[in-house]
Image (cartoon, rainbow, N blue to C red):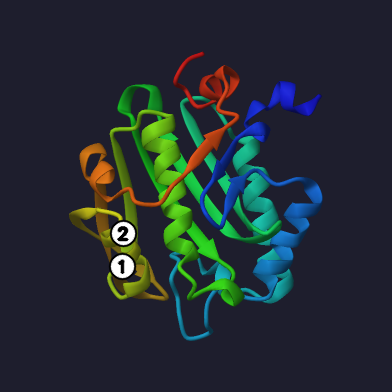
């Protein structure tokens, strides 16, 4: 069976309203459909890559390419796990968790998006809280980091609600101008103080741990 070769297919992270996991093929198609319907308002630019402003068909294909690219480049020392968030069986967005040399550094970074039609219901916060439980409780992470544009209050609010602290600034070029981003960092201790969302992790087998660089 495929799960014998890719045990992460059995990983499940469950919160009150959501289940985060890798998608089946038909579910990945529904996720692409969701992205095609929009991931942010036309006047917004929450991502450094302009994929959210692409035409609908290209936006959908971007989601597919990103999913397959991350699986294809996977190594235990350099991985990106794109967990699809499902609500009542339907995809509502993606919460990713990424790491390099995690077995030594015990640090993860993350990113996410929620379909425009599902925004405003607190799902982004719940997705991140579920991912952080997986990282800290399931994988024994010591640090989690995030980066948000300084003019993206929604993303910054999620980070601060979950206990992240300022960790400096970065400058990138966005549409020919300088854009400032804020780095944020969450320690294991701060996570424990802010972890109020009940989360359950199942399927985190020795095979999963080997793929994530934490040993069997």
Q: Do residues under tags 2 and 1 come within 8 Å of each other at their CB atoms?
A: yes
Residue placed under numbered mark 1 in the picture: 157
Q: Is residue 125 visible?
A: yes
Query: Which of 119 and 202 lies nearest the eye of the viewer?
Result: 202
Q: Position of residue 30 (x, y in %)?
A: 75, 61
- Disc 1 crowd, CA 10 A, few/some/many (<14, 14-19, 20+): few
Residue plotted at (46% across, 48% down): 130
Residue placed under numbered mark 2 in the picture: 159
Which residue in the rendered view is the most extreme toward the bottom?
A: 43
Apparent side of residue 19 relative to residue 158 in the rendered image (left or right): right
Compared with 154, 16 (above or below) is above
SS of the residue under disc 1? helix
Q: CA distance from mark 2 to mark 1?
A: 5 Å
Residue 63's image quarter?
Answer: bottom right
Compared with 125, 167 (above or below) is above
Q: Position of residue 59 (x, y in %)?
A: 66, 68
Apparent side of residue 177 relative to residue 199 in the rendered image (left or right): left
Apparent side of residue 130 relative to residue 152 in the rendered image (left or right): right
Q: Position of residue 67 (x, y in %)?
A: 64, 48
Residue plotted at (44% across, 31% down): 138
Number of marks in the rendered image = 2
Q: Position of residue 92 (x, y in %)?
A: 62, 63
- Disc 2 crowd, CA 10 A, few/some/many (<14, 14-19, 20+): many
């Amino acid at each position: 069976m495929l799960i014998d070769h890719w045990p992460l297919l059995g990983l499940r992270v469950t919160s009150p309203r959501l289940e985060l996991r890798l998608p089946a093929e038909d579910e990945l198609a529904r996720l692409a459909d969701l992205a095609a319907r929009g991931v942010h308002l036309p006047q917004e630019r929450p991502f450094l890559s302009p994929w959210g402003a692409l035409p609908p068909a290209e936006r959908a294909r971007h989601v597919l390419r990103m999913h397959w690219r991350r699986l294809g480049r996977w190594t235990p020392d350099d991985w990106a796990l794109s967990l699809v968030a499902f609500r009542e069986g339907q995809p509502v967005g993606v919460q990713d968790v990424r790491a390099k040399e995690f077995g030594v550094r015990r640090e993860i970074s993350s990113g996410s998006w929620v379909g425009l039609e599902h925004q405003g219901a607190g799902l982004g916060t719940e997705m991140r809280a579920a991912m952080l439980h997986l990282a800290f409780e399931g994988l024994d992470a010591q640090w989690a980091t995030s980066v948000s544009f300084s003019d993206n209050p929604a993303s910054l609010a999620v980070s601060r609600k979950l206990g992240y602290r300022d960790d400096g600034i970065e400058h990138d070029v966005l549409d020919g101008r300088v854009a400032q981003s804020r780095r944020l960092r969450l320690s294991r201790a701060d996570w424990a103080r802010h972890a109020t969302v009940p989360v359950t992790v199942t399927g985190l087998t020795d095979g999963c741990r080997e793929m994530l660089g934490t040993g069997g």
